[in-house]
Image (tube, rainbow, N blue to C red):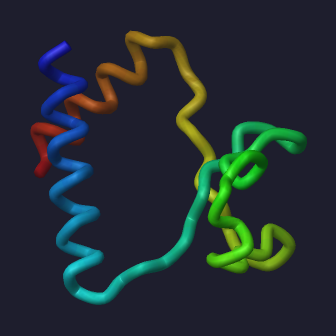
């Protein structure tokens, strides 16, 4: 659990630094062709994200142990 907490803290720190530096790029996650983060978003009218021309984030596909290992590697690199 500590690996996940450390990972979340590092991602939050990086994201907050980017926002404070003026980077407010919208990049929602896309889970499948029919399901994405914009599907139920109440702010879609404000952000004007166009899925046809803008890239989305694709979640890591893998077994839980592989994902935890990737998080641990990220924690050790940063």
Above-or-below relation of 3 to 38: above
Name the one closer to the observer, 77 or 49. Answer: 49
User: Quadrant where the N terminus lies?
Assistant: top left
The one of 63 and 44 positioned closer to us in this rendering? 44
Q: Name the residue: 89% across, 41% down.
A: 34
To which quarter of the image does residue 62 belong? Answer: top right
| Image height of 42 relative to 48, above or below | above
**x and y, in percent, of residue 18 in the image:** 26, 75
Within the image, what quadrant is residue 20 found in? bottom left
> What residue do we see at 55% from left, 72% from top?
26
- Residue 58 left/right relative to 18: right
Single out the residue that lies furthest toward the bottom.
Answer: 22
Residue drawn at point x = 57 percent, y = 39 percent:
59
How far across and how far down the image is residue 51, in percent? Answer: 79, 68
Q: Residue at x 22, y 34 (%)?
A: 73
From the viewer's perspective, is residue 57 above or below residue 45? above
């Amino acid at each position: 659990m500590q690996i996940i907490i450390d990972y979340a803290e590092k991602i939050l720190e990086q994201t907050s630094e980017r926002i404070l530096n003026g980077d407010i790029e919208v990049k929602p996650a896309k889970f499948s062709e029919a399901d994405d983060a914009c599907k139920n978003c109440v702010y879609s009218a404000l952000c004007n994200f166009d899925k046809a021309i803008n890239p989305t984030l694709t979640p890591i596909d893998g077994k839980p142990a592989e994902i935890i290992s990737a998080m641990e590697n990220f924690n050790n690199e940063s």
